[in-house]
Amino acid sequence: MKGRDAKPHVGIFGRRNNGKSSLINCLADQEVAIVSKEPGTTTDPVKKSMEITQIGPVVMIDTAGTDDTGEIGKKRVDKTREVIRQIDLGILVLAGNLFDQEEESVISQFEKWEVPYLVVHNKSDLDPLHDRFKKQVLEATGKQVLEFSALHPHNREALIGQIQSATPESATEGVVTAGQDAGVGLADGAAQGVRTAASSASAAIHRPPGEVVA
């Protein structure tokens, strides 16, 4: 993992109002990120530790829109780009069948820092994914874009599956989920019990006749 926390770091990138924060809430299955219809609600990168079913503990990083404008907006975009160096996996969030230089610039940063990434077309309940657009994204990235709706996440499991597959193994080494932790504890306890029983049996075999154990 690239972050200080011993968990995979996943960064969410895309234009303002593409539903990046909504996607994080959907993955967490609870409201952990502020959502608003007003573009630019997220102004600085925000790290959110959470546990995703089937994946385990992760750190999701919500970022400002890559298309932010003005002098302050440019600084926000610079901070967003800095996040790419800290993550194990990137998710590029599209919407409205829009993909041009803005998205290509983010992808170039992924490639520069050798960060694996996924491409998700959000808000598909409002503007479904077009076949021509899917072909455009495939030609530009070599990746299949996942059609998604954070409002109606019928294929949430598909997204989680893609995150699992795309996250480098090095990012998950040493990470144990609560269920796994409990399983390890039970296994350790059972192993200790076997060792104790074996020790007792060995002592009984080698005990002199007539010796009484207190």
Image: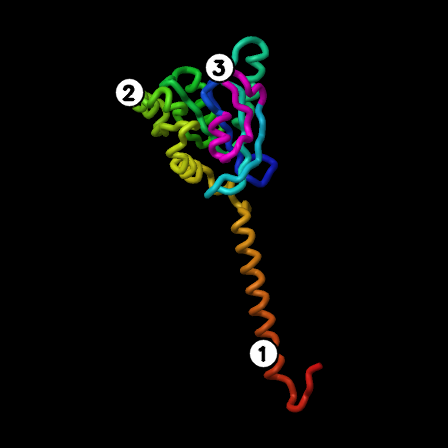
Label 1 neighbour load within 10 Å: few <14, some 14-19, many 20+: few
Look at the numbered discs 2 and 3 and tell me whether their residues touch, using CB distance below 8 Å.
no
Q: Quadrant of the N terminus?
A: top right
- Residue 1 visible within the image: no
Question: What residue type is disc 1 on?
Answer: Ala
Location of residue 186 with respect to 42 vertically, above or below = below
Question: What residue type is disc 2 on?
Answer: Arg
Q: Main secondary structure of the magenta part?
A: loop
Q: Residue furthest left?
A: 131
Location of residue 209 with respect to 81 vertically, above or below = below
Query: Toward the viewer: 200 or 31?
Result: 31
| Nearer-N-terminus badge (2/3) | 3
| Nearer-N-terminus badge (1/3) | 3
Q: Which residue is mark 3?
A: 67
Q: Position of residue 35 (x, y in %)?
A: 52, 23
Instruction: Give SS at disc 2.
Output: helix
In percent of the image, x 43 and y 19: which residue is there?
103
Q: Which mark is residue 132?
A: 2
- The answer to which quarter of the image holds residue 111 is top left
| Nearer-N-terminus badge (1/2) | 2
Q: Is residue 71 magenta?
A: no
In percent of the image, x 58 and y 69: which residue is there?
195
Q: Position of residue 152 (x, y in %)?
A: 40, 29
Q: Position of residue 68 (x, y in %)?
A: 52, 14
Query: Toward the viewer: 111 or 17?
Result: 17
Q: Residue furthest bottom?
A: 210
Instruction: Give SS at disc 1.
Output: helix
The magenta segment: 21-44
**What is the spatial separation of the Cα atoms under label 2 and label 3, in whole angstroms?**
23 Å
Q: Which residue is mark 1?
A: 201
**What is the spatial separation of the Cα atoms under label 1 and label 3, in whole angstroms?**
72 Å
In percent of the image, x 48 and y 25: which residue is there?
20
